Image: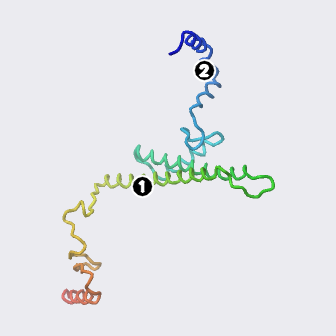
Amino acid sequence: MATEKQIAANRANAQKSSGPKTAAGKAKSSMNHLSWGFCSNGILMPGEDPAEFRSLLDDLLDQHQPANVTEQILVEKMAQNKWLSDRAFRLQGESFINNMMPGENFAIPKELGVLIRYRTCAENAFHKAHNELVKAQKERKKSEIGFESQTPSDNPSHQPENDPEIVPITWGQAIPRYPPHITDEEIFAEVMAMDENAA
């Protein structure tokens, strides 16, 4: 437990500073929470062009035409992860240049492994968001036209593959599906017999 002397000292110190007073100081302190790099809350680092990121996002929005909030979020994730992937690639090149020793042509930077992992992670996240977007758009389009899935588990009238069923052929007739032990010649002979009967 704090003594009276410590409490008094703490109160006196609290009166000395209450944070930045100027606009510049406040702007600088507002960035204290930001951790720079790939784990950043902000997508842009100092020196990166916001217009270039906006252009990337606009291009992806134009290409994928999100129709709801979920699709919009997935497109934004794609843009962010593409941006992070490109940043990691750029930093890989910069780290090679910065780590070259005088008189040496080639040196492997210490941070190369981390940069490669960051780039791979961003690329995987981009592809995951893209796949989720494509799936969400397909589901939305199916629901708009009233499509219902007819997979075997959904359709109780579906017959197993080894059961004979009527399969339409190109010229309008129907022939039974044959088990695998019947040869092509036997199938051909039966189809020819069906043609002769139809004529």
> In the rendering, at what x and y percent does residue 94 appear?
69, 50
> In the rendering, at what x and y percent does residue 80 appear?
53, 46
Name the secondary structure under disc 1: helix
In this image, 167 relative to 28: left or right?
left
Q: Nearer the viewer, residue 51 or 105?
A: 105
Mark 2 burial class by Cα count in 10 Å: few <14, some 14-19, many 20+: few
Query: Which residue is most to the right?
Result: 103
In this image, 34 relative to 168: left or right?
right
Which dot, 1 or 2, sits closer to the camera?
2
Rounded to the nearest angstrom, the CA distance separating label 1 from label 2 is: 48 Å
Colour scheme in use: rainbow
Residue occupied by mark 1? 134
Q: Nearer the viewer, residue 3 or 107?
A: 3
Q: Which mark is residue 75?
A: none
| Image quadrant in which you'd find residue 148 | bottom left
> In the rendering, at what x and y percent does residue 39 appear?
55, 42
Q: Residue at x 66, y 41 (%)?
A: 47
Q: Amino acid at mark 1?
A: Val
Disc on the earlier residue, 1 or 2: 2
Q: Residue at x 56, y 48 (%)?
A: 56
CB atoms at circles 1 and 2 under 8 Å apart?
no
Residue occupied by mark 2? 19
Q: Nearer the viewer, residue 72 or 156?
A: 156
